[in-house]
Each structure stands twice: as C-alpha cells, then as structure tokens.
C-alpha cells in the first residue's frame, strides 16, 4: 500500500481546533475578554448583535500589539504568555494555549484593530476562514478592538446548532458576569442590539456583586475571610434566608479565574447545614488565592475545572471559614441547643409575615353578593380571613363554571362514576364537603366518595384560567394605589422582558422596565400585592431552570409556575363555600384529574370498593 498519511492544511487544523475552543458566541466572548485582561486593560466594552450570532465586538484599552504581533496572533500556538513548558506551572495569565484567535478566525469574519504604545500608527487586519484578506495601517488609540462577524458562517451545521437568541444571550451574560465578578478593578460594559445590559464601573468585590445582581444584594451578603498557608479566602456568602430556588448565584474564583467545583460546592453547602430550606441553594461569591504551582488548570480545554494538590485540606478550611462567618454575623446559631425556634420556620415565610398588615375586615362586604369587587383582594385577606376574602379571589373571572349542568356532564375514567357525579339534591350537595387535615377536600358522590388534593386542584384551576388569559382573552387587572418597585438582576430583567407580554395578559401592568428594576402598577385580581415579589422570583427561577424551546412551552411554563404560586397551599383552612368553589371549578376544567405537573388531583372510593372492604 502506498503512503496515505498527510499533514492537514492549516485552515482545516484550525477549524478542528475551533470545535474545542468555540462552542457558541459566549465562548468567543470569554476568550476575547480574557485576552483583554491579559493585556492589562482597565476598561473593556462588549457589543453584541443578535446574541452574538451576527456580530461580537470587544474593545479594550490594554497594551495593544505591534504590527508583527498583530499578524502573528492569528497563528496557531502563537502566544506571548509562555515560553517554555516550565512556565505552565506558574501561570498568572488566563490564556496560554495560543489557540483562541486562530480558532475564531477559522470560523468567522474577523477584523482586528490594534496599536501598542511604541508604534505611531496602528494596524488593521481582516481575516476570514483563516485567510488574511487585508492588512493596513490605521489611526487608532492604544489598545485592541476585535470584531467577530457571522460566527460559523462556513460551518452551517454548527451554525444551525446554535440555540435561540434568548438562550445564547443567557450564555453570554453568564460568561460576562463570571469575568466581571473576577475583576472588579476593571470597568466593563455590555450592549446587546443597542441596549445596555451592564455598565460596571471599576470598584471593589462587594460593589461589583451588587452592581450585577441588583441593589438589594448588598444587605444579603455576609463577608468571609480566612488566611492560611495553603489558601487565602475572601468574598461573600448570601444569608441563608435569601437562598435561591436555583443555583444561579454560586461562584468560585481561583486566582481570579471562575471555576466549577462540585467538591468545594459541597463544602459550602455543608457549612450551611441545617440553615437552609429543602431544595434551596445559598448564593456565594468566593475568591480563593492559591500558589499557582499547587493547581493544574490544564485538565479541561475550556478551563473551568481545575485540580488542587490538597483538596481535602481546602474543603475543611473553606467549610470552617464559612461556618465561622455565618456564626459571627449572627445568621447561624453558634450553639445548636440554643437554637432560635424562628430558625426552624421557612425563612421566606418568616420574613413575609412581618410585612403583612393587620387583618382588614370589610364590614360591608357580603360574600354572597355576586358582584365582583376587584379592589378587595389587595389585603391578602384570603390567608387570614378566608370567609370574607374568598370570592374576591375570583373576581374578574366569569362565573360560568358554577353552572351545575357542566359538572353533571363530567365523565370519569373509571366506569363506576360516570354519569351524574354529585348527589342530585342541591341542598345536600351544598353541605357535602369537608376538609381533612387542612389538605384534602372530601366530597360525597352518588356512587362513593371523592378525595381532592386542595393545592393540586386549585393549581389546575388557575393553570387553565391563566392559559386562557395568555392565549385568548386577557384577564382583568387590579390597579395598585402606589406602584410597586421591585429590584432584579439585569439577567432576570432580560428574562422578564421576554415574558412581559404574557404577564400583561394575566393582569400585570408594568409601568417601567429598567436595567435592574421594574415598576408594577397593576396586578392580577387573583393575587395580593404582598405575594407579587415571591411569585415573580419563583417564576424567573423556574424559567431559568427549564429552558423552553418554543413559544408554546414557555407559555405553559409561565402558567404552571404562576398557578403553583397562587394556589391555596396545603395546610390552609378552607370554609365550606371555598371548598365548594374548588370542587365546582375543578370539574369544569378540561383536565380535572391531573395537576399541571401531571400528578393526581383526586381519588375516588366507590361504594362497591367499600363493600368489598367490609366483606
Ligand atoms: P493566548 O491568549 O492563549 O496566548 P490567543 O490566541 O488568545 O492565545 O492570543 C494570541 C496572542 O495574541 C496573545 O498571546 C497575545 O499576545 C495577543 N493578543 C490577543 N488578544 C490581545 C489583546 N486584546 N491585546 C493585546 N494582545 C493580544
Ligand atoms: Mg487567549
């Protein structure tokens, strides 16, 4: 056989390498940001179009490049950062592989403009698909500006693989935040399609965190510091009562580089032991400084995992440092047996209760009057005074479901209960429900008994109602006397912007949406003002955890999340009218037997089944 092995041409080799370095627009942003930081920039601007798919531009005021270096920078394995293999063990820069620019230039149309402090004029180089198409002298300030257009233009398969703009933007924001958090002394801006997403002045760690995650974050932070021979720890953990329902705000930085470490994450969680509600995750922003010789960054191509020489010691130090801080700042009981009983109640509720104003009893209110009265549900009264406030929960919704005709036509899957579901005598039906353990509504059927999970049933009812509002007819809204201003991170505000219209259909009125806050002047009639913040937080966290792929499933997710938050909880006392209301409305639903998350809403026990038990 003749010889068959040949060297791959450079542009092919570069494309292959690009597959490892560049997965999506966010990877380009990460590499270019790191280059600007390595070039000692103090101000870095990122401008993207269409989630970075059309264009990514990064401008820095760093050291810039000479004409020769500018040309060299696009060669594979061309780097100014290491000279020998020895240097790999004492890295202080982010880059060292010399692959990023070569990879990016292989799969996009790139324009580099740069000037160092010694050159009179700068250089502008255009390169696409690894081919230099032009190189000229130009007038420019010291620093570097790189524009990357039409990523994957020459690899359609990769381009088609990119996700929706919303998803890609989220990835970009994630990368941007990680880099920005690691370098508070550098000013960063991020613009998307002409909108400013972040404008971060140079500052300290604490301010940077607050600038990114919103003004309220500051009061939630507990400082952590520890100095040992092995490691210097600084940074913050979030107070346990502000733990989130998603892992969003968890950051480790080792020598100013964002890393992922399930092992160290475990150390943090262990320090919070006993202080967190189930399925909630504490925020943390922890900066570790270690000897560069004691870590190996090289084990992962995208460099977010590293290996420590002495992981076990690190674990123990981290855990005890955080435990100490939580204790010192009085957020954790120092001695377990002196535990404050308050710490055992779910934090969210503990705090909320303090804000709820006293029970307002509207003496003129007649629960049996049919007329709707949208203003009333404002007092959160259904928690405190269910009897008086109940009907107002449904104000604004047509009461067509109380029509018993419809209920009669429900068919159950099991043969036995098909036909007339309830006892035919009206007055008997009125009294035929009771509540079990404040959790289940029990009702008699003609052929047996029916046990309904109150929370799931109400969730199903609200879910269908909300879906209808979002897709068909908008719900009525209750005006707030004073607009409610809520703060969110700019990332959360991005998401809120995406679902704004759907939310408006459910009755929300947004008087302004800013970069890190929202002003709400109207809310759905079904909720009270005090619930709004919790509902929206839960919604954003749900949206973040489940990435929907098309409009329909996002609507579905939205309705599911809101319904879950708005529904009566188990443990809530319901009077007879309320129980009836739930039963009636449930069986007017399209799918009464399942909750929106596909769990059984009720069970039946027929007389036949009972008879068998008594045999
Ligand atoms: P690496 O960062 O691993 O060295 P890159 O391909 O990212 O590899 O960059 C190649 C070289 O180009 C760098 O080593 C650096 O010398 C130069 N360079 C890249 N970006 C910049 C920049 N923004 N400012 C100054 N020099 C840069
Ligand atoms: Mg680099």
Image (cartoon, rainbow, N blue to C red):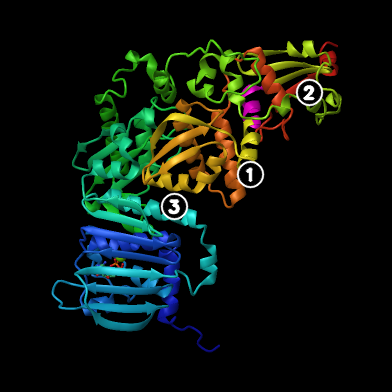
Range of the magenta residues?
A: 453-461
Residue closest to the eye, 104 or 445: 445
Q: Is residue 44 left or right of residue 399?
A: left
Query: According to the image, label 2 marks what residue?
Result: 404
Under tag 1, what secondary structure? helix
Q: Quadrant of ligand 2?
A: bottom left
- Give me the disc on residue 170: 3
- Visible residue check, residue 573: no
For marks 3 and 2, give the one nearer the viewer.
Answer: 2
Residue closest to the eye, 428 or 538: 428
Under tag 3, what secondary structure? helix
Q: Earlier in the sequence, mark 3 or mark 1?
A: 3
Under tag 2, what secondary structure? helix
Query: According to the image, label 1 marks what residue?
Result: 471
Q: How many marks?
A: 3
> Image quadrant of residue 111?
bottom left
Q: Position of residue 147 (x, y in %)?
A: 35, 69
Q: Position of residue 40 (x, y in %)?
A: 20, 61
Location of the N terminus by quadrant is: bottom right
């Amino acid at each position: 056989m003749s010889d068959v092995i040949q060297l791959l041409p450079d542009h092919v080799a570069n494309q292959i390498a690009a597959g490892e370095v560049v997965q999506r627009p966010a990877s380009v942003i990460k590499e270019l940001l790191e280059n600007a930081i390595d070039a000692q920039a103090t101000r870095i601007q990122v401008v993207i179009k269409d989630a970075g798919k059309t264009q990514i531009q990064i401008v820095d005021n760093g050291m810039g490049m000479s004409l020769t270096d500018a040309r060299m920078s696009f060669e594979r394995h061309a780097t100014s950062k290491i000279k020998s293999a020895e240097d790999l063990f004492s890295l202080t820069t982010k880059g060292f592989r010399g692959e990023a620019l070569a990879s990016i230039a292989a799969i996009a149309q790139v324009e580099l403009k740069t000037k160092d402090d010694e050159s009179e004029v700068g250089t502008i180089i255009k390169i696409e698909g690894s081919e230099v198409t032009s190189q000229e002298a130009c007038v420019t300030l010291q620093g570097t500006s790189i524009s990357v257009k039409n990523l994957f233009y020459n690899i359609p398969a990769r381009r088609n693989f990119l996700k929706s703009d919303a998803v890609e933007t989220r990835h970009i924001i994630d990368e941007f935040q990680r880099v920005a958090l690691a370098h508070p002394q550098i000013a960063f801006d991020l613009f998307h399609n002409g909108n400013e997403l972040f404008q971060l002045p140079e500052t300290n760690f604490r301010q940077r965190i607050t600038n990114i995650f919103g003004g309220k974050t500051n009061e939630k932070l507990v400082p952590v510091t520890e100095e040992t021979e092995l490691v210097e720890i600084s940074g913050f953990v979030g107070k346990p009562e502000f733990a989130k329902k998603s892992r969003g705000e968890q950051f480790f930085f080792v020598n100013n580089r964002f890393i992922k470490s399930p092992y160290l994450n475990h150390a943090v969680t262990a320090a919070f032991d006993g202080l967190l509600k189930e399925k909630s995750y504490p925020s943390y922003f922890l900066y570790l400084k270690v000897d560069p010789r004691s870590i190996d960054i090289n084990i992962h191509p995208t460099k977010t995992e590293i290996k420590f020489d002495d992981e076990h010691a690190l674990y123990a130090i981290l855990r005890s440092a955080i435990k100490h801080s939580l204790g010192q700042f009085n957020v954790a009981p120092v001695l377990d047996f002196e535990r404050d009983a308050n710490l055992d109640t779910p934090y969210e509720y503990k705090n909320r209760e303090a804000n709820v104003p006293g029970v307002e009893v509207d003496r003129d209110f007649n629960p049996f009057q049919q007329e709707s009265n949208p203003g009333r549900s404002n007092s959160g009264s259904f928690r405190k005074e269910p009897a008086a406030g109940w009907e107002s929960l449904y104000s604004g919704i047509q009461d067509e479901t109380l029509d018993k005709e419809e209920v009669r036509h429900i068919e159950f899957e099991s043969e036995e209960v098909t036909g007339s579901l309830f006892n035919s005598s009206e007055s008997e039906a009125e009294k035929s429900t009771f509540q079990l353990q404040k959790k289940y509504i029990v009702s008699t059927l003609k052929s047996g008994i029916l046990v309904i999970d109150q929370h799931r049933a109400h969730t199903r009812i609200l879910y269908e109602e909300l879906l209808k509002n979002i897709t068909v007819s908008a719900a009525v809204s209750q005006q707030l006397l004073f607009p409610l201003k809520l703060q969110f991170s700019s990332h959360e505000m991005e998401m809120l912007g995406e679902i704004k219209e759907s939310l408006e259909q459910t009755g929300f009125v947004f008087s302004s949406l800013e970069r890190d806050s929202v002003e709400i002047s109207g809310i759905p009639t079904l909720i009270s003002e005090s619930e709004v913040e919790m509902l929206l937080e839960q919604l954003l966290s749900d949206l973040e955890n489940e990435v929907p792929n098309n409009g329909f499933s996002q609507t579905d997710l939205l309705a599911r999340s809101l319904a879950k938050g708005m529904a009566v909880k188990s443990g809530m006392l319901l009077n007879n009218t309320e129980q009836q209301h739930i039963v009636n409305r449930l069986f007017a639903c399209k799918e009464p037997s399942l909750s929106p998350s596909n769990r059984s809403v009720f069970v039946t026990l027929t007389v036949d089944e009972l008879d068998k038990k008594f045999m």
